[in-house]
Image: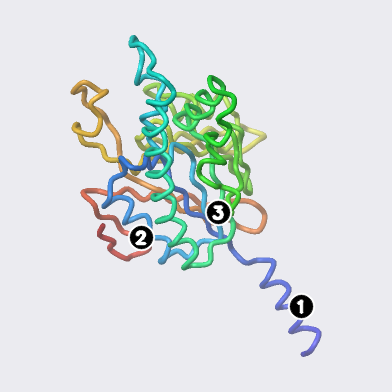
């Protein structure tokens, strides 16, 4: 191979784009099956290099801070079978995602802790000898190949940061951007928002709230007590350029259908 050809190959390698697919707020086992199916099928279309789950992968109802609010806390012996069911349900959901990631050889995997996962840590604080119930251990994240980030510790890829989410105000994208002062993507609020900010010397930065993949029905969200919500089913695809710049696509799923790169996907 001639020197010029070697140089061209090196340049091509350096300029290779990388892609990530981002799943928000799945809330196993209260996930929306059609929405999740759409997101999983997108993995096969995009064939990403990176997978990021930005937290609340589980509902964790039986670990919930609200389940026994105003009630007498039952014995640990009573709680354990219910907690074990939560762990089994979330692991079964992760198995579904991991199967698709394995199929398409997605090696870089990140799991962010959501506010629902904090409930497991709170449980272990109350019962310190139950360390196997911490989220990373209960869901075998290390064995599954995930790099784990604790609640709202930013994961930075290229020039964008990922957290579960801090604010749920009306204009939460604006609030996240003003607070963190950098490109940031998050879930937590279950709806889609974007806000950008341009500074004279620093250029433009943005914040993206990317919805959820959970069941949005009243039946599965009785805690809302019938209140209406503005949630959206969605996930995100990010293309990274060699210099760390990126392009964000937020793929909204409407009635179990979406379009990914010209492909109609139906859950």
Closer to the camera, 197 or 139?
139
- Which label sits in the foreground, 2 or 3? 3
Residue 8 position, x and y percent, is: 71, 78
Determine which quarter of the picture holds residue 40.
Answer: bottom left
Q: Earlier in the sequence, mark 2 or mark 3?
A: 3
Q: Residue at x 40, y 39 (%)?
A: 25
Residue that extends furthest to the bottom in the rendered view of this protein: 1
Determine which quarter of the picture holds residue 85.
Answer: top left
Badge 3 is on which residue? 144
Task: Confirm or deny contact between disc 2 and disc 1 (CB under 8 A).
Answer: no
Q: Earlier in the sequence, mark 2 or mark 1?
A: 1
What whole-number distance in Å separates the C-alpha atoms at marks 3 and 1?
38 Å
Closer to the camera, 205 or 108?
108
What whole-number distance in Å separates the C-alpha atoms at marks 2 and 3?
27 Å
- The image shows residue 114, relative to residue 257, as above or below, that is above
Residue 1 position, x and y percent, is: 77, 90
- Which label sits in the foreground, 2 or 1? 2
For label 1, count other residues whose C-alpha is less than 10 Å away and answer few (under 14), some (14-19) or many (20+).
Answer: few
Q: Residue at x 35, y 46 (%)?
A: 234
Q: Earlier in the sequence, mark 3 or mark 1?
A: 1
Q: Judge left or right: residue 91 versus residue 17.
A: left
Closer to the camera, 119 or 76?
76
Number of marks drawn: 3
For label 2, count other residues whose C-alpha is less than 10 Å away and answer few (under 14), some (14-19) or many (20+).
Answer: many
Q: Residue at x 36, y 33 (%)?
A: 82
Q: Residue at x 39, y 49 (%)?
A: 93
Q: Which mark is residue 211?
A: none
Task: Confirm or deny contact between disc 2 and disc 3 (CB under 8 A).
Answer: no
Badge 1 is on which residue? 7
Badge 2 is on which residue? 260
């Amino acid at each position: 191979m001639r020197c010029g050809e070697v140089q061209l190959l090196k340049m091509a390698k350096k300029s290779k784009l990388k892609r990530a697919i981002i799943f928000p707020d799945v809330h196993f086992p209260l996930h929306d099956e059609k929405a999740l199916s759409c997101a999983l099928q997108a993995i096969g279309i995009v064939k990403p290099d990176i997978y990021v789950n930005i937290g609340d992968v589980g509902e964790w109802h039986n670990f919930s801070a609200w389940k026994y609010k105003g009630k007498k806390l039952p014995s640990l012996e009573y709680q354990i079978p219910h907690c074990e069911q939560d762990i089994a349900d979330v692991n079964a959901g992760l198995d579904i995602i991991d199967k698709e990631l394995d199929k398409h050889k997605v090696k870089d995997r990140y799991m962010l802790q959501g506010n629902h996962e904090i409930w497991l840590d709170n449980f272990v604080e109350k019962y310190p000898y139950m360390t196997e119930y911490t989220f990373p251990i209960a869901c075998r994240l290390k064995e599954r190949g995930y790099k784990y980030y604790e609640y709202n510790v930013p994961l930075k890829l290229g020039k964008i940061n990922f957290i579960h989410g801090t604010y749920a105000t009306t204009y939460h994208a604006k609030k996240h951007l003003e607070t963190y002062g950098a490109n940031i993507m998050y879930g937590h609020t279950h709806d889609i928002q974007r806000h950008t900010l341009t500074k004279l010397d620093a250029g433009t930065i943005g914040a993206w709230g990317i919805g959820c993949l959970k069941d949005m029905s009243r039946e599965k969200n009785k805690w809302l007590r019938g209140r209406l919500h503005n949630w959206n089913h969605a996930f995100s695809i990010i293309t990274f350029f060699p210099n760390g710049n990126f392009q964000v696509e937020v793929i909204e799923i409407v009635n179990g259908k979406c379009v990914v790169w010209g492909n109609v996907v139906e859950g």
